[in-house]
Image: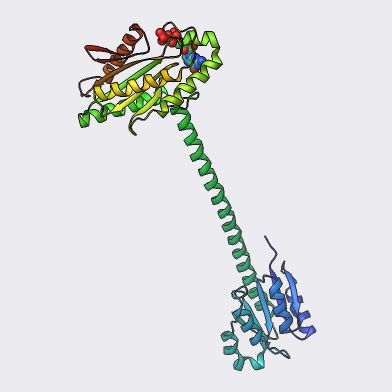
């Protein structure tokens, strides 16, 4: 903590010396001035714990000095004690308080009274300093805390992203798909509107990997993802990667006809990419098979039934020569091109 500074102002060197002697017992930095002008100049450079100001000085007297000090925002709160001859006291005391004195001491000074008063102001200054330091520390900690909070939020966001998205494609992962599917199922029960599910699977992808290598296989998955992401779907439709080369699209409030239209757009968009696939069992380029199912969700029906139906539709598409879309409404199967 900073050592308290005390300014003593008196035009007589012997008075300054006497004050210095009385202040000797305190652990302070003492600054001396023998005129009001000099005292004002010191207040520009220092932050004083206390100013002991002589009243009668040639030129600017103590009252004028005090008024000028009080007029300055920086010095406004520095305690000033006037020191004056006892004979002048009665006529001067009010003027002293008006010009901003916090106390009035009469010469000759009584050492014990003087020192105990000065001691109080030093203590006040030290308490003020301690409070200022604590406030600064508190502000620093607050900034640190805000930064940590920010980092925590970012980390949580990243964690959430990592736990809900697939690293290779950036699409929703299987875990998030299951959550979204379950939410949409519940929403469908409430609104009693059709919920459709499209499951699509790249044809002969094992052979693709075997022929071109796993790295090219990864690039191909990313290319397929880009294409699927660019297919115009509705805002509420959700695309996810639910397996190695298997993707799903949840289409809330969509009937079979609408879902089949979307499925056909999906199949065609991959077909049109014409990615070479020399070892495909059905075509010379990369294709997908698509399974579609639609149901109006009901409380006594498991959402798994919709998944199973879409899976079975996909299975059917594979066995119908691949590169096609099949739909299945739990019992009835329709094969489409
Ligand atoms: N490159 C790459 N390959 C993957 C990834 N995930 C799964 N696979 C591969 O995808 C292939 C899927 O093979 P299968 O399940 O036999 O299916 P398929 O060869 O596509 O045959 P059909 O589905 O019947 O047309 C496997 O060889 C997996 O190793 C991946 O992230 N990157």
Between 36 and 224, the one lying in front of the other is 224
The quarter of the rendered structure image containing the N terminus is bottom right
In the image shown, does 85 or 329 lie closer to the viewer?
329
Image quarter of the C terminus: top left
In the rendered view, does 233 fall on the left or right side of 51?
Answer: left
Q: Which quadrant would residue 111 be assigned to in this image?
A: bottom right
Q: Is residue 30 above or below residue 211?
A: below
**Residue 5 spot, x, y in % from top left:** 70, 70
Q: Is residue 237 left or right of residue 10?
A: left
Residue shown at 25% from the left, 29% from the top: 253
The residue lying at 26 percent from left, 27 percent from top is 254
The residue closer to the viewer here, 85 or 130, is: 130
Residue 199 image-quadrant placement:
top left
Q: On screen, 140 above or below 185?
A: below
Percent coordinates x, y for residue 29 in the rendering: 74, 69
x then y, percent, for residue 259: 28, 23
């Amino acid at each position: 903590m900073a050592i308290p500074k005390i300014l003593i102002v008196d035009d007589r060197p012997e008075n300054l010396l006497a004050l210095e002697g009385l202040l000797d017992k305190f652990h302070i930095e003492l600054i001396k001035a023998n005129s009001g002008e000099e005292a004002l100049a010191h207040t520009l450079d220092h932050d004083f714990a206390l100013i002991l100001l002589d009243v009668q000085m040639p030129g600017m007297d103590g009252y004028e000095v005090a008024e000028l000090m009080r007029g300055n925002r920086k010095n406004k709160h520095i305690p000033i004690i006037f020191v004056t001859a006892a004979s002048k006291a009665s006529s001067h005391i009010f003027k002293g308080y008006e010009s901003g004195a916090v106390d009035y001491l009469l010469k000759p000074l009584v050492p014990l009274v003087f020192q105990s008063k000065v001691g109080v102001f030093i203590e006040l200054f030290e308490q003020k300093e301690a409070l200022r330091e604590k406030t600064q520390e508190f502000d620093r900690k607050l900034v640190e805390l805000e930064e940590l909070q920010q980092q925590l939020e970012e980390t949580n966001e990243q964690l959430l992203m990592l736990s809900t998205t697939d690293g290779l494609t950036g699409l929703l992962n299987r875990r998030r798909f299951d959550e979204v599917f379950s939410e949409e199922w519940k929403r469908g029960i409430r609104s009693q509107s059709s919920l459709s599910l499209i499951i699509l699977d790249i044809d002969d992808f094992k052979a693709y990997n075997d022929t071109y290598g796993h790295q090219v296989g990864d690039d191909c998955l990313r290319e397929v993802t880009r294409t699927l992401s660019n297919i115009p779907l509705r805002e509420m439709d959700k695309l996810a990667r639910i397996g190695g080369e298997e993707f799903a699209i949840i289409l809330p409030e969509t009937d079979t006809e609408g879902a089949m239209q979307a499925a056909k757009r999906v199949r065609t968009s991959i077909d049109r990419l014409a990615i070479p696939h020399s070892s495909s069992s059905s075509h010379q380029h990369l294709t997908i098979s698509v399974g579609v199912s639609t149901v109006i969700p009901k409380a006594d029906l498991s959402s798994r039934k919709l998944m199973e139906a879409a899976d079975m539709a996909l299975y059917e598409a594979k066995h119908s020569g691949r590169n096609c879309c099949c739909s299945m409404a739990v019992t009835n199967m329709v094969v489409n091109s």
